[in-house]
């Protein structure tokens, strides 16, 4: 998984599904840290209109910009929808934050050819590089 993590962190166009306006939420911390580290980050959340002054996109399928990596910060039930959308859109890399996946979601993503990271936090990995 280290190689996949390294490959993903080289990519610059990220989406955070579950981006959140509250600074206490991981969806906000991840959005901010990726941005701080120079990534182009698109916040996806159907509930909130903006995160850190950037308009959110209601769903992954509605993102019109190029996407290299999807960071998932939602429940496993919602994560399965994200995986199916990513496959349909031809996205190769998906990173599940702790708590955003279960075995079914991981198995489905991997069996459909996605490069998957789980049991690792992007916040921690960014500080290592």
Image (cartoon, rainbow, N blue to C red):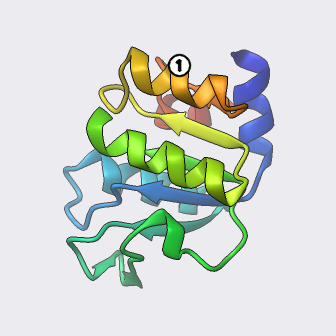
Figure check: 96 above or below 84 = above
Question: In percent of the image, x 73 and y 70: which residue is there?
Answer: 66
Residue 86 relative to residue 29: left or right: right
- Per the image, the residue denoted by label 1 is 107
Figure check: 65 above or below 80 = below
Tell me, yes or no, if residue 98 can be seen here: yes
Quarter assignment of residue 95: top right
* Helix, strand or loop under label 1: helix
Measured as percent of width and height from the top left, residue 127 is found at 58, 34
Towards the viewer: 41 or 118: 118
Measured as percent of width and height from the top left, residue 65 is found at 67, 77
Figure check: 10 above or below 48 = above
Tell me, yes or no, if residue 74 can be seen here: no
- Where is the C terminus found, in terms of image quarters? top right
Question: In percent of the image, x 74 and y 58: which residue is there?
Answer: 12
Quarter assignment of residue 39: bottom right
Question: In percent of the image, x 45 and y 49: which residue is there?
Answer: 82
Measured as percent of width and height from the top left, residue 23 is found at 23, 58
Figure check: 128 above or below 71 = above
Towards the viewer: 125 or 57: 57
Question: In percent of the image, x 80 and y 35: which residue is there?
Answer: 7
Density class for disc 1 (Cα within 10 Å; few <14, some 14-19, many ≥20) is few
Measured as percent of width and height from the top left, residue 115 is found at 70, 31
Residue 49 relative to residue 29: left or right: left
Quarter assignment of residue 34: bottom right
- Where is the N terminus found, in terms of image quarters? top right
Residue 84 relative to residue 67: left or right: left
> How many marks on residues?
1
């Amino acid at each position: 998984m280290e190689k996949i993590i390294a490959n993903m962190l080289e990519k610059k166009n990220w989406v955070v599904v579950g981006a959140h306006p509250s600074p206490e939420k991981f969806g906000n911390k991840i959005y901010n840290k990726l941005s701080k580290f120079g990534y182009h980050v698109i916040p996806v959340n159907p509930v909130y209109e903006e995160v850190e002054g950037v308009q959110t996109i209601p769903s992954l399928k509605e993102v019109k910009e190029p996407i290299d990596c999807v960071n998932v910060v939602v429940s496993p039930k919602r994560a399965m929808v994200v995986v199916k959308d990513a496959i349909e859109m031809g996205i190769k890399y998906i990173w599940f934050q702790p708590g955003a996946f279960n075995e079914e979601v991981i198995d489905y993503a991997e069996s459909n050819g996605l490069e998957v990271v789980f049991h690792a936090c992007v916040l921690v990995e960014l500080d290592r590089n």
